[in-house]
Image (cartoon, rainbow, N blue to C red):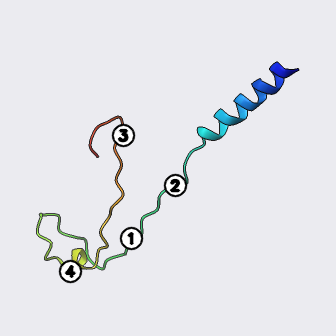
Amino acid sequence: MIIYGFAAALFFATSSAGAPASPRTLAVQRTSSPPIVDGDLADSCWRSAAPVTGFVRLNGKPP
């Protein structure tokens, strides 16, 4: 009986540890014209864009 209790406790402890985190969200805005992707942030849609942070490393590699 003790073995069954230990096995159940071990199962529940490991099943909650592997639960996926809540999905991350990102707020975006619709623009009236497509942005120009040229590295120059003078385009009007880039001025109204919110910065994006919170990137994570996967498998030890930079994002």
List the single residue furthest toward the right. 1
Dot in front, 1 or 2: 2
Residue 44 or 54: which is nearer the viewer?
A: 54
> Image height check: is 14 above or below 7?
below
Front: mark 3 or 4: 3
Is residue 35 shown left or right of residue 11?
left
Q: Residue at x 22, y 70 (%)?
A: 35
On the image, numbered disc 2 is attached to which residue? 23
Classify the position of the N terminus by image quarter: top right
The residue pinned by badge 3 equals 58
Labels 1 and 4 touching (C-beta < 8 A):
no
Identity of the residue drawn at 36% across and 57% down: 54
Q: Which mark is residue 44?
A: 4
Q: How many marks?
A: 4
The front one of 22 and 2 is 2
Asked whether the beta carbons under mark 1 and mark 3 sit within 8 Å of each other, the answer is: no
Which of discs 2 and 4 lies nearer the camera? The answer is: 2
Question: Label 1 belongs to which residue?
Answer: 28
Q: Amino acid at mark 1?
A: Val
Cα separation between marks 3 and 4: 33 Å
* SS class, disc 1: loop
First along the sequence among labels 1 and 4: 1
Of residues 55 and 39, the one drawn nearer to the viewer in this rendering: 55
Instruction: Identify the residue shown where x is 38% and y is 70%.
Output: 28
